[in-house]
Image (spheres, rainbow, N blue to C red):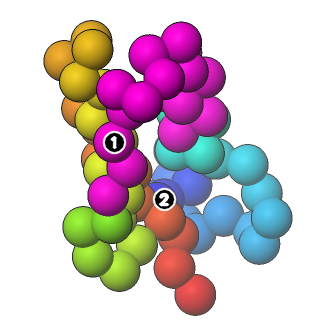
Amino acid sequence: MLGIGDGERPEYGAVTEEDLAFVAFTLSHSPCGDGVIEARLGEGLLLQWCLACAQMRIFRSPGP
């Protein structure tokens, strides 16, 4: 997950667009309940898939 704009890594603890997108997806699909699947695809990759809404998103973590 890269920082906003310049491609540099964000400061530790900084909130990035990717963090906000993850939270937005999670909260917007919370009414779907058990119809949301989260799966680790590899180191630093998380897939969220809402079966009820047929939406899928992959999130990347910043790494060490």
Q: Secondary structure at mark 2?
A: loop
- Magenta span: 22-39
Residue 34, image quadrant: top left
Residue 13, x across and y down, in percent: 80, 64
Residue 7, x across and y down, in percent: 46, 59
What is the residue that sits farthest to the right in this orientation? 13
- Determine which residue is flagged by label 2: 2
Residue 4 in view here: no
Q: Is residue 28 above or below residue 21?
A: above
Compare residues 48 and 64 and report the one nearer the observer: 48
What amino acid is found at the position of numbered circle 1 in the picture? Ile
Q: Is residue 42 above or below residue 31?
A: below
Q: Quadrant of the C terminus?
A: bottom right
Residue 37: mark in rendering: 1
Q: How far apart are the two marked residues, 2 and 1, measured between alpha carbons?
A: 24 Å
What amino acid is found at the position of numbered circle 2 in the picture? Leu
Residue 23: mark in rendering: none
Residue drawn at 48 percent across, 23 percent down: 33
